[in-house]
Image (cartoon, rainbow, N blue to C red):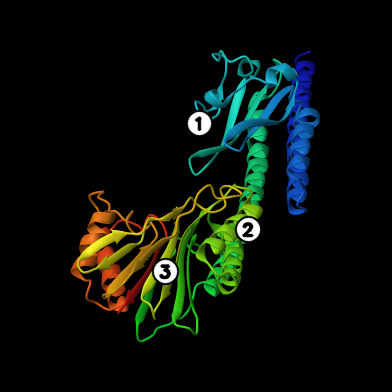
Amino acid sequence: MPELQEIKRTLTRIEKLEREINLKQLQINSLLAITQAINENVSSDGLFNMYNSFLRWEIGIRKMALFFKESGKWECKTALGVEEKLLEHDVNQELSKYRSTRGLENSEHALIREFDLVVPVMHKDEPIAYAFIGGFDDDDDVYNKVQFVTTITNVIAVAIENKRLFKTQLRQEVLNREVELAAEIQRTLVPSRLPSGKNFQLSSIYKPHFAVGGDYYDVVEFPDGTIVFCIADITGKGVSAALLMANFQANLRALVTRCQTLEEIVQEMNAAVHRVTQGDRFITLFLARYDTNTRTLHYINAGHTPPLLLCNGEVVPLKNGCTVLGWMPELPFLEIGGVCLTDEAMIFSYTDGLTDVKNDEGEEFSEAKLVDFLLKHAQLSAKELNIQLLAFVEAYRGRQPFPDDITVLTCRVF
């Protein structure tokens, strides 16, 4: 009889060993199948279905829920053995508690307490997935099952994360190309050379905050000695702003040569911008016409930062005009400004990115500091003034970045 009992014990050990071998073989086959699916670029949903099937049929897991983060929130991607209404419970506040595999016997959360264990998958100390498992029998080899679930969850989670990172990289490459395209568009719109004459000087500064900015300036010279110049700030960034700028420039150039008055130009520009944007975006614009023969300046300020007229030691902001362009289909009011420049003068137009510059103490450059600088350097040529202004602003900001685009158009008349 002792011999028979020993034979039975041996057979039991053999049967247990066979079960363990079969389980290991299942694990190997499952990992091979998933690895092959990953190599064949099976979709995320396909991988989730394989994960569910392996845990259910080949490992014998009765309860499971797998969570991944989508748009900043944890969402259940696949589950088994859990009521649908329980899966509707929000777990976002709970998951941060779990940084390693642990039991859930003390959980009070309606969904989480349905499970026995949580298996977090970490990447660079940040969780990228959570697997909740439960429903074990007393005779289950829990240790080996948990080890396999941990392995297969890590494989699936890393594959899904790699897919997400690849898509992010593709989106970034598309975005980079869009930015390059927008930058190319802008380079063709901003004048590479400015006209000059015996009665006037023009000089510009153009520093987009990023590769693509929302600022614009232009100058058109006519044979009769008249120059029309403008500076504008277009809401938005990127390709959309660049395309709007291209449309704006084309319309403005056509209107400047066709229309007789600044009022007509601005009215038609407002209607054109509104047709394109439907009021979702707008443009601030300062548009001026200077007649070098009569030395008269006429202008319209459409909601733009007022340019500064420096003459005989005085500074006058050029405010007359109307509201921003494109906000409404018709401008509710419009006032043309005009001045006769009998002496040497300078019209300094700029976008608000210049005065928004801050130093290391958080103090803005401000209009007051700008006026002080201009008065001290009023005798310089337009080009030299801009060179010294840019150097001054660079020194002023110290280690602080430029907060926005900076565009300057300086016109000196004499």
Q: Secondary structure at mark 3?
A: strand
Q: Callout 2, which amino acid? A: Ala
Q: Give how far across and how far down residue 132 sits, in percent.
A: 64, 26
Can the viewer see residue 95? yes
Residue 71 sits in quarter: top right
Residue mark closest to the camera, 1 vs 3: 3
CA neighbours of label 3 inside 10 A, class few (<14), some (14 to 19), many (20+):
some
Question: What is the spatial separation of the Cα atoms under label 2 and label 3, in whole angstroms?
Answer: 25 Å
Q: Secondary structure at mark 1?
A: loop
Q: Nearer the viewer, residue 356 or 133?
A: 356
Residue 27 sits in quarter: top right
For the N terminus, which image quadrant? top right
Residue pointed to by mark 3? 206
Q: Give how far across and how far down residue 10 sits, in percent.
A: 75, 24
Residue mark closest to the camera, 2 vs 3: 2
Q: Callout 3, which amino acid? A: Tyr
Q: Is 346 on the left-hand or right-hand side of 41?
A: left
Can the viewer see residue 398? no
Q: Nearer the viewer, residue 176 or 287?
A: 287
Question: What is the spatial separation of the Cα atoms under label 1 and label 3, in whole angstroms?
Answer: 50 Å
Q: Earlier in the sequence, mark 2 or mark 3?
A: 3
Residue pointed to by mark 1? 99
Q: Nearer the viewer, residue 135 or 14?
A: 135
Q: Residue at x 63, y 58 (%)?
A: 272
Q: Tell me whether circle 1 and circle 2 mark residues in contact (CB < 8 Å).
A: no
Q: Is 38 on the left-hand or right-hand side of 267?
A: right
Q: Give how far across and how far down residue 118 sits, in percent.
A: 59, 26
Q: Secondary structure at mark 2?
A: helix
Q: Is residue 175 above or below residue 191?
A: above
Residue pointed to by mark 2? 272
Q: Callout 1, which amino acid? A: Arg
Q: Is 352 on the left-hand or right-hand side of 66?
A: left
